[in-house]
Image (cartoon, rainbow, N blue to C red):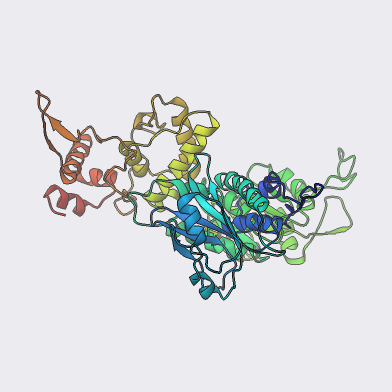
Amino acid sequence: MIAPRLWQGTMRAGMSSSPDAQAILSAVGGLLGREIAIDDFLRRLVDEIREAMQADRGTIYLVDRAKGEVFSKVADLPPELGEIRLKLGQGVAGYVAATGDVVNVPTTGGEARFFPGVDERTGYRTVSILAAPIRDRSRAIIGVIQLLNKRTGTFSAEDARALEALAVQAAFAIEATTLYEELTRDRRTEEASIPLSARFNRIVGESEALRSACRLTAKAAASSATVLIRGESGTGKELFARAVHVNSPRAEGPFVKVDCAALPATLIENELFGHEKGAFTSAEQRSPGKFDLAQGGTIFLDEIGELPLAVQGKLLRVLQDKEFDRIGGGKTVSADVRVVAATNRDLERLVAAGQFRADLYYRIKVVEIRLPPLRARGAEDILRLARHFIGAAARRHGRPVPRLPELTAQRLISYPWPGNVRELENTLESAVVVMDGDEILPEHLPLPASVSLLSADEAPTMPNLEPPPQWPRAVSGIPAQETQPDGRVERVKTLAEVERAHILAVLEQVGQNRSAAAKLLGIGRNTLARKLRGEE
């Protein structure tokens, strides 16, 4: 845990100490580009502010616009309570979220904005409150910082100004995380509120397969167990390896990556374990290996299935005895290193073929995390990742964030993504660079014109056929309304008619092949037949 450091305010003659608002980013800024658990990041953020302001307790509430509520993302609550949700306008936090005012309550006695129900649920006695809105760069309120019970007296007007400044820095920090995208994306067509499952910064998605991997990652991080991460190329194995490290007790130690597939068999032993002076002709001095460099931290062995058998034996010794010998060395070196390995190969088949040691196989898979391929994560995750990558690429290349119309979204969903998340990211960055106008069209995507379509069972279902507000009024080339030559609007097409016309257009595109059309549309063949008959 990073110790709070904001309490480094400047003392001025005749004035109380005041926290440095800029210090908050230096205190937690190093975490912004890492795969830290979002809850842990926000906890460190609020702890910095609480200590700086000499408050007894601190809470960050986030705004859930879909439900018209604020909810406590980090707070000192009994385990059985989980979270606190308040309607916008309810309680001090709800009032601040609704109005944008900074509120200083010296005493809760007789204060109309104070909601005693929270104290009744938590068993805590609130005496004084200071709360400020967290606004993003567009001035939209995305949350509230609330402090309870100043340790010495009550919160002053200077405290209120200081918290307002700290809230600005907190907003900058939150905007740099992937949580910000969930707080601000358009949910007018969705019933679900902001997901509160265990998540890590920089890991985007809410499918159950990904949630399961995240839950297991959190458990693995809290332990000292060796971890094996399995998944196809491009599924994010290194991201999850870093999440294991960043959220572990070794987080302040080094994270050292070794790509076992990129090194010749003759060099991999030296790369991992180093050598002593004189070990071979050109060894003029001792050279540390990756295990030396990873002391006190984590070593990530990517593509461990590529390790030569001779080196596998030395790795087994590290895992069993926590020691190794450098090449040409006679002195055993202790290894205070956690091992996280990854592979996209069938290790069981390699073991059966005698190409991978069975004893090493069982040693590295103490905790096994399986990452789902992108095609198995569902349409929502594909589009969520697409929005994330489009926004990141637009910022990186200095362009406005383009829209993603329905036809392009359909193309993204129907493609099987053999390169998984990495391929999706590269595809959308290319589209952002080459596109004209303000939206990404299917022709901007550098995807093959003819692809092996997913089976009806594999294809993700389009989350919503009705275009959300940011999509154009006309989709699939079908006008939203029919206009007569004299300018009169005859009528608006119903959603069922638009859907049927789109299905017929897809059928025309695939030569009336219903199986192929069903795959492109992400529905079963029986569902397609029902829709063509006009049934629900």
Quarter the C terminus occupies = bottom left
Residue 315 is drawn in which quadrant? Answer: bottom right
Quarter the N terminus occupies = bottom right
Q: Is residue 459 above or below residue 91?
A: above
Q: Nearer the viewer, residue 266 or 422?
A: 422
Residue 384: tell me if it is visible.
Answer: yes
Residue 33: tell me if it is visible.
Answer: no
Q: Nearer the viewer, residue 18 or 414?
A: 18
Q: Position of residue 166 (x, y in %)?
A: 64, 48
Q: Is residue 400 above or below residue 157?
A: above
Residue, x 46% and y 37% (percent of image)?
Answer: 390
Residue, x 72% and y 52% (percent of image)?
Answer: 6
Q: How many marks?
A: 0
Q: Nearer the viewer, residue 23 or 283?
A: 23
Q: Position of residue 288 (x, y in %)?
A: 82, 47
Q: Position of residue 165 (x, y in %)?
A: 63, 46
Direction front: furthest residue? 110
Relative side of 55 to 376, left or right: right
Residue, x 89% and y 42% (percent of image)?
Answer: 285
Q: Nearer the viewer, residue 370 or 390?
A: 390
Residue, x 54% and y 72% (percent of image)?
Answer: 119
